[in-house]
Image (spheres, rainbow, N blue to C red):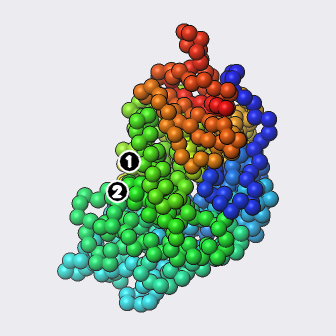
Amino acid sequence: MFGRIMPVSHPATAQTRADVLWWRTAVIYQIYIRSFADGDGDGIGDLAGIRSRLPYLRDLGADAIWITPFYPSPMADGGYDVADYRDIEPLFGTLADADAMIADAHGLGLRVIIDIVPNHSSDQHRWFQAALAAGPGSPERERYVFRPGRGEHGELAPTDWESAFGGPAWTRLPDGEWYLHLFAPEQPDFNWENPEVVTEFEDILRFWLDRGVDGFRIDVANSLKKDQSFPDVGSEAEAVLVPHEGPHHPFWDRDEVHEVYRGWRSVSDTFGADRTFVAEAWVDSPDRLARYTRADELHTAFNFAFVRAPWDAAELRATIDKCLAAAAVVGAPATWVLSNHDVTRHATRYARLDSTGGGVTDEARVGPNTPLDPALGLRRARAATLLMLALPGSAYVYQGEELGLPEVVDLPEDVLADPIWERSEHRVRGRDGCRVPIPWTTDGPSLGFGSGDPWLPQPASFAGLSVQAEQGVAGSTLELYRSALAHRRALTVAQTVDWLPSPEGSLAFRRLTADGSSVVCVVACTDAAVPLPAYDEVLVASTALEHGPDGETRLPGEAAVWLRLR
Ligand code: NOJ
Ligand code: MG
């Protein structure tokens, strides 16, 4: 079907574990554990499921996996409400299963990044339970953010802060005190002014580093420190995950938060330069983001500016330039993402007829009534992936994007499990549409996800997008990813992109490779075909190339290609 694509003869072998700076160029595959693979048939993904699919990830060409929280949790927010940071949720397995999973992954050359959630715990965490029992003024309450209320009888919340999931960020207890939760009420915020909290988290890091994990993805890394004068935000606060950043906001991206990460870096460094952190910090400016990756802080931070960029050549180029420049100032690699478990999948985002970028806000999400062109969305998503994977730095691939899975926009309301749905009083459906269990086979119960009913129903269309349906099929999205990941290994010499002239609405840039040749990535972001420069070889293309009236080779519109030039 795509005649000019060069076949990849062998599956990529993962980078060797001797490479201590692996995280600077790695492709990391994100596993949303509840929805990846179910080993015990209860309809919920688990560690046994992950272990059984590790060879698939090695063959795909991933260097590492990032697993979303697997700790004991009442699942008020899909595991981002942690009840015990040193154990495994029974639904997912045991500590022994985690050890075995880490050993298996390492045996296959895959690194393992786990999720750490330092802003808040579950309300079922023993510290929060102790705080409730101990009452106002106790040292137990000092581990969280408890405050008296305002108003004559303390009946008004201490500040006007809003929860990222909607509604007030404070909940009042029967004893009159209020506690802070920037997310759900079941997720009380820790008090990061308390040295006991600082010590506890450094100790949790050591616990997992000792067990062999290669790194941590830090949940809401930008919210730990709160303005101790507890001022009002003062404006109509947004009921969304996306903050106004900056040193002057009472809780998003305050300068003091960096102290925490200098401490964390000194912990990880004692385990070696190959242990790494990636910050989840939704800050708008690449310069503010780069501060998290200064030499004595975190190694990497997700570039969400790229997620937010619309499918537009000029905007994409400006975003890439800003992200690369900001990262270069601090000597950090850039870190690219197109999809994750919080945003509308990119195959559906780019299917919006208004082609806006993505994000976690209500307006940025694709809902059941958004006008969509799914075929166009997939075509652009495949091109966007080739663009992302050609950029210098590390890249994250979210489970299922390698199959071209769309967002499931029409899940029945009675299955919606994201706390955003209830907290928004059923105005915002939330993030379940990108969390539907992965289809592994073309038929059978839950399409090979497991033997039981999956916790979210899969649409019938998933059968044709399953691993089984795409594996070995030339032109499938799965084979496109495998081929791109195999060729990407040669791209990692120059950490810069050299932009080349290209027609309006398109992008072209060159990367130098290890053998002294160069690879040119051309992306057509409109429906206009783009004439290609002279090349020696087509490495990978998101769609079949075409020939113009004079016989010249052209990249069709809404597509991307990697060309080798000697
Ligand atoms: C970011 C996580 O990615 C998201 O899923 C979660 O709801 C919030 N942090 C709160 O922990
Ligand atoms: Mg299970």
Residue 239, labelled with which disc?
A: 2
Q: Is residue 531 above or below residue 402?
A: above
Q: Amino acid at mark 1?
A: Asp
Residue 521 place in picture, x, y as percent: 57, 34
Could you say which is closer to the camera, residue 105 or residue 407?
Answer: 105
Residue 162 place in picture, x, y as percent: 33, 63
The residue drawn where x is 52% and y is 70% is 296
Could you say which is closer to the camera, residue 23 or residue 477?
Answer: 23
The residue drawn where x is 25% and y is 69% is 232
Quadrant position of residue 235: bottom left
Q: Is residue 452 above or below residue 208?
A: above
Q: Is residue 307 left or right of residue 84?
A: left
Q: Look at the image and tell me whether residue 488 can be seen.
A: no
Quadrant position of residue 144: bottom left
Q: Is residue 230 above or below residue 324?
A: below
Q: Amino acid at mark 2?
A: Ala
Residue 455, labelled with which disc?
A: none
Q: Is residue 466 left or right of residue 417?
A: right
The residue carrying pointer 2 sits among few (fewer than 14), some (14 to 19) or many (20 or more) residues within 10 Å by Cα, namely many
Q: Are marks 2 and 1 in contact (CB under 8 Å)?
A: yes
Q: Residue furthest bottom?
A: 138
Disc 1 is placed on an element classified as loop
Q: Earlier in the sequence, mark 2 or mark 1?
A: 2
Look at the numbered disc 1 and say if its residue's Cβ is closer than 8 Å to ligand 1. no
Q: Look at the image and tell me whether residue 243 can be seen.
A: yes
Q: Is residue 521 above or below residue 116?
A: above
The residue carrying pointer 1 sits among few (fewer than 14), some (14 to 19) or many (20 or more) residues within 10 Å by Cα, namely some
Residue 313 place in picture, x, y as percent: 44, 34
Q: Which residue is mark 1?
A: 362
Quadrant of the drawing holding the C terminus: top right
Residue 404 place in picture, x, y as percent: 60, 36
Could you say which is closer to the camera, residue 501 or residue 214?
Answer: 501
